[in-house]
Image (spheres, rainbow, N blue to C red):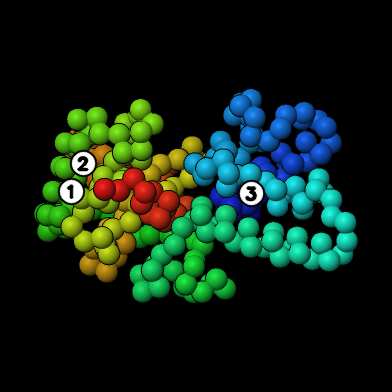
Amino acid sequence: MSDVTYGNALQSVANNCSYLRMKKLCKEKFGDHRCVNCKHYIGNYTDAAQSQLNLFMYQVDINVGMVKHRSKQDKSTALIVILILAAFFGLLLWAQVRPDSGLIGKSWLGDLKARSMGIENLSSQQYADEHKDIQDTLQKVANDLNRKVDVNGDKLINCIDAAVLFYQYYPDRSKVRIMWNLNHNTGMNHLFNAVLIKGTWTSIEPQAKWNNHSHWMPDVWGSQYDPKKNVDATQIYLKYVK
C-alpha cells in the first residue's frame, strides 16, 4: 500500500468537494456554516484562515473545471496563478525551516521548504539527568497548564497549548521545534516538540510533567506514534508564542 501524505490527502478532499459542487450533488456554497459537518470540507483538516481556504479552493475549482476561462491566454495565466497559489498554500501548511537547520535538504523552492521530518528518538532516559533545560521547561509548561493558560483562545487545554508553551520557554530557540504528527492509520493527531540533543533531533512530549509520565514520545504513544509522519509546524504556531 502506498504511503498517503497529508498534502495528498488534503488535495484529494478538496478535489472531491469541488467535483460534488460541480455536479450539483452538493448545493452548498463553499465555506457555508453547514460545511463543517461534511467530510469533504478541507477546513476540518487545517486551521488555515477561511480567506486562505477560499484561495486554495478557487485554484482547485479551476483544475476540476468549475471556473471557465475565455481564452488560451487566460488559461495560461490561470495556470501560473494556480502554481503560485499551490506553492503558497503548501508553504502555509508545512511552514519554513532555516537553511542551516540540517533538518531537510534543499528543494526546488530554494530557501522556502515544504517538508515532512522523520526525527530520530532516543530509546531510553539514560541522558535525562543531563538535560536540565528540558526538565525545567516541562515544569514551566505544567505550571501554566495547571493555571489553564490557553495560548490560542480555543477554550481548550490540550497539546497545542503544551507544545507552544514548551517552545516559548525552552532557552535555545535554535534547538527546539513545534512538531505535528498526523496518522489516520493509527488515529494519531498530536502536537509535541523536538529538541536537538547531542546532534539528534529528539521528540519530546511537552505534557509529561503535567500528566506525570515519560517525556519521550515513543514511551507515551507506543506503536501509535510513527516518527516518519512528523511535520515541522513551528511557523504555523509561532503566532501564539509570546
Q: Answer above or below: position of 122 versus 206.
A: below
Judge left or right: residue 206 versus residue 84. Answer: left
> Mark 1 highlights which residue?
137
Residue 227 visible at all: no
> Which residue sits at x=44%, y=62%?
96
Judge left or right: residue 39 versus residue 142. Answer: right
**Of discs 1 and 3, which sits in the foreground?**
3
Q: Nearer the viewer, residue 159 or 5?
A: 159
Tell me which corner region of the image, top left, top right, bottom left or bottom right, holds residue 127: bottom left
Tell me which corner region of the image, top left, top right, bottom left or bottom right, holds residue 42: top right
Please state the horizontal and vertical placement of residue 189, each as a whole percent of the image: 45, 40
Q: What residue type is labelled 2?
A: Val
> Which residue sits at x=74%, y=41%?
18
> Mark 3 highlights which residue?
55
Q: Nearer the viewer, residue 43 or 205?
A: 43
Q: Which amino acid does label 1 sit on?
A: Thr
Q: Answer above or below: position of 150 versus 49.
A: above
Residue 100 visible at all: yes
| Category of crowding for the residue at label 3, using alpha-carbon neighbours closer than 10 angstroms: few (below 14), some (14–19), many (at least 20) | some
Distance from disc 2 to disc 1, alpha carbons, whole Å, reads 6 Å
Q: Answer above or below: position of 18 versus 83.
A: above
> Mark 2 highlights which residue?
141
